[in-house]
Image (cartoon, rainbow, N blue to C red):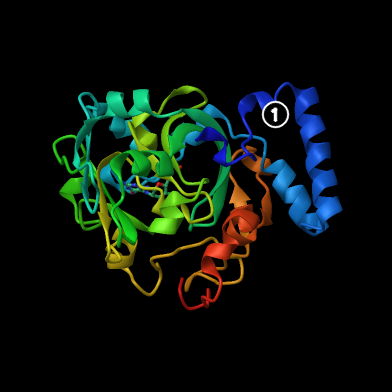
Amino acid sequence: MANRWTNTLSQSDVTPEAAFLNRRQLIAGAAAGFGLAGVAGVSNAQEALTPNSWEDITQYNNFYEFGTGKTDPAEYAGALTTTPWTVEIDGMVKNPGKYDIDDIKAAMTIEERIYRFRCVEAWSMVVPWNGFELADLLEVAGVQEGAKYVAFETLYRPEEMPGQRFQSLDWPYVEGLRLDEAMNPLTLMATGIYGKDLPNQNGAPLRLVVPWKYGFKSIKSIVKITITDKEPPTSWNKANAREYGFYSNVNPNVSHPRWSQASERMIGGGLFAKRVPTLMFNGYEDEVASMYEGMDLSKQI
Ligand code: MTE
């Protein structure tokens, strides 16, 4: 199952530095050979392979259940109890049920995936996730014929999630993917970062990671997964349908109504933080573009 996607990069691929440089050359060579991208695209892709620091990834977050400020999640999410934790899988599946997170983790192949991560707010990071392919979990659950979408739901527990005492969003946070998107080998259920369990502020103990979509699709602290034949509601679309669509694929050519999406600020580097061009589908065009053939991506945002 793990080798369905052969392009996986792991931490051992990019360190030590000699190996990292090798890989950069390989990628530059491959891109030149196949004419995959212009010079700007290639250099952006290479730089993006340097993961952000643990501090960047865990101290600058969006997790409105703990407040709307970037440092609120790191400050308040420690109070969240993540043991015991169950994930309910229901809807159009052959094996519905409430599954313990430890049983899920034990049954799945946990691997490392270094992905670019692009927030709709036009900042980005590179994160070395640990996790398993959502496709593998759906395989075990047994998707029924006729199913078309997968819906996800975050925990609702205002006693431990102080942001849920305010209507900054309609709780619980919900998200969704089309079934083919959910089955795409890039779609990860993350359980860790840098080989450690996910910190609460990053969505412990289980969160979605969809690297070619804006970050808000990557729903945190999941308690429920529903397989359905109807397009599920999604939190940001409910909050503002004009600004946030169901698909929310990273697209430098389609501006957010209030700002451009053509470039992004790379978190890290402090004073010298760089702005780089945003890549179509966040650099994962080869892997995902075929799913959207025939769609008008300026309208189906
Ligand atoms: N999931 C839940 N439940 N609540 C949230 O507020 N924020 C989203 C997404 N998942 C959010 C969420 C947004 S806007 C982003 S950019 C990413 O989480 C941020 O993930 P990170 O903090 O791990 O970088």
Front-most of residues 179 and 232:
179
Q: Is mark 1 within 8 Å of ligand 1?
A: no
Amino acid under disc 1: Val
Front-most of residues 26 and 162:
26
> For the residue labelled by badge 1, is the local secondary structure a helix, a strand or a loop?
helix
Numbered disc total: 1
* Vertical comparison of 106 with 96: above or below: above
The residue positioned 25% from the left and 57% from the top of the image is 169
Instruction: State the image coordinates of residue 228 (x, y, percent, origin top left).
Output: 26, 59
The residue positioned 75% from the left and 29% from the top of the image is 20
Q: Is residue 173 left or right of residue 263?
A: left
The residue positioned 77% from the left and 58% from the top of the image is 37
Q: Is residue 295 left or right of residue 148?
A: right
Q: Is residue 276 left or right of residue 234?
A: right
Instruction: State the image coordinates of residue 53 (x, y, percent, origin top left).
Output: 57, 30
Quarter where residue 286 is shown: bottom right
- Specify the farthest residue to the left: 159
Looking at the image, can residue 282 be seen?
Answer: yes
Q: Which residue is the site of mark 1?
A: 14
Quarter where residue 113 is shown: top right
Looking at the image, can residue 72 be seen?
Answer: no
Q: Quick one: label 1, few (<14), some, or many (20+) residues within 10 Å?
A: some
Instruction: State the image coordinates of residue 243 (x, y, percent, origin top left).
Output: 40, 70
Instruction: State the image coordinates of residue 126 (x, y, percent, origin top left).
Output: 58, 40
